[in-house]
Image (spheres, grey):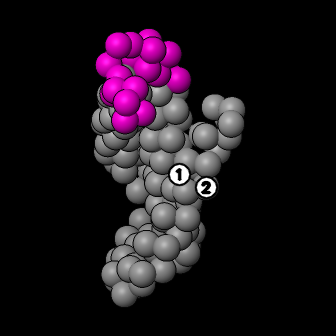
Amino acid sequence: ASMERHISAGFLAGSAHAGINYAMDGIGRLRQLTALDRAQASLGMAKGAVSPFFPYMLHHAISHSVLFGTYEGTKRLMVPSLGESSLKDDENNVHYGNLLAIGLAGGIAGSAQHVVSNYTETVCV
């Protein structure tokens, strides 16, 4: 699949993650809505002027897009060099270079998602 599809899949996964979490955290969200209504009223804004779901969804969608895209991109860069290495056990059909590349790609992608998630949480939510 293309990089665009991996990034789009991450966006959809993040949106689904946000929607499911949002639904499951209904009671907490009701308290947030009450606090948001109070804050909007104190700032002279109309009640409901800001939807609390969209920034929450955007935060998750962006960070998951980074996770999926970074993982796939890093894996594509690393597998050709590490996967072709002598780190393999042909008898058991295990290619340690592939495992190493995939593990490193996952770690790099997880770290990138963590940084982006922390940033988008302060900007979006």
Q: Is residue 124 visible?
A: yes
Q: Which residue is mark 1?
A: 61
Q: Nearer the viewer, residue 7 or 34?
A: 7
- Over which residues does the magenta segment extend? 76-96
Residue 27 placement (x, y as % from top left): 37, 87
Residue 37 appears at what percent x and percent y? 43, 77
Q: Residues within 10 Å of mark 1 (few under 14, many from 20)?
A: many
Q: Which mark is residue 12?
A: 2
Secondary structure type for disc 1: helix
Residue drawn at x 47%, y 54% is: 60
Above or below: residue 1 compared with residue 25: above
Q: Amino acid at mark 1?
A: Ala
Which of the two marks, 1 or 2, is nearer to us in this view? 2
Q: Looking at the image, do the residues carrying marks 1 and 2 touch, with CB atoms under 8 Å apart?
A: yes
Q: Is residue 114 left or right of residue 40?
A: left
Taking the spot 49% from the left edge, 73% from the top edge, the residue there is 20
Please tell me which residue is depicted at 37% across the width and 35% down the height of the picture. Answer: 92
